[in-house]
Image (tube, rainbow, N blue to C red):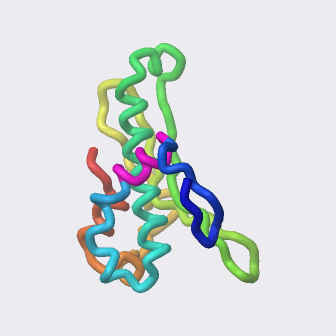
Amino acid sequence: MFESRRGKYNLFDPQLKVIISLLTPRLKGVELAAEPIAFVTYQMYGIVRDLLEQCIKDTDDVWDWATEVAIVGGIIINRRTGGDFFQPLSFEARTRNAPPQDLFVEAFGPRPDLVPILGAEGPVQEILYGKH
C-alpha cells in the first residue's frame, strides 16, 4: 500500500497494473497538452475503445445473437456549471465480416478539434480513428 493525497492504493492491485501498463506508452506527448488530465482522459478512452474492439473480435458467438452492433464512444466532461457533457468521439455500426461503418459525421456533425487539448495531430488521429 502507498498513500497519496487521494487515498491509499495497493501496488499489487492487478487492475491498476494493467491500467498503468496500457497507459504508459500512450503518455508520449503529454508535455505538449494544454491540460495533462484531459490528455490522459482521452488516452483512457482510446484504451477502452481498443479493449472493446478486441472483445468483439474475440467473442466468436457475438454474431449468433445480433446481425448488427452499434457502438457509440466518448468521454464525459465535468463542468462547473450547466451540468456534465458527453462528448461523442465515435459512432459506428458493425456487421459480420465487414469493416465498421463510420456514422459519426452523419449523427453528430464534424469531429471535435482535439489538437488544442492533445497538443499534436498524431494523438488526435489515434483517438478519433484508432487502429481498425
In the rendered picture of this protein, how many numbered marks are placed on residues? 0
Residue ranking furthest to the left: 122
Q: Which of 40 and 81 is in front in this view?
A: 40
Give the x, y percent position of residue 70. Answer: 51, 39
Give the x, y percent position of residue 46. Answer: 40, 55
In magenta segment, residue 17: yes
Seen in the image, is 26 located left or right of residue 1?
A: left
Residue ranking furthest to the front: 1
Give the x, y percent position of residue 5. Answer: 62, 72
Does residue 104 lie above or below 39 as drawn?
above
User: Which image quadrant for residue 120?
Assistant: bottom left
Question: Residue at coordinates 32% horizontally, 69% vertically from top-left?
Answer: 124
Does residue 29 lie above or below 131 as drawn?
below
Question: Residue at coordinates 45% horizontally, 19% vertically from top-left?
Answer: 63
Dominant SS in magenta: helix
Question: Residue at coordinates 33% horizontally, 59% vertically from top-left?
Answer: 24
Q: Nearer the viewer, residue 122 or 15?
A: 15
Question: Residue at coordinates 54% horizontally, 59% vertically from top-left?
Answer: 2
Does residue 76 lie above or below 120 as drawn?
above
Give the x, y percent position of residue 131. Answer: 27, 48
Does residue 110 lie above or below 92 as drawn?
below
Seen in the image, is 85 located left or right of residue 17?
A: right
Q: In which quarter of the image is the C terminus?
A: top left
User: Which image quadrant for residue 59?
Assistant: top left
Magenta stretch bounds: 14-22
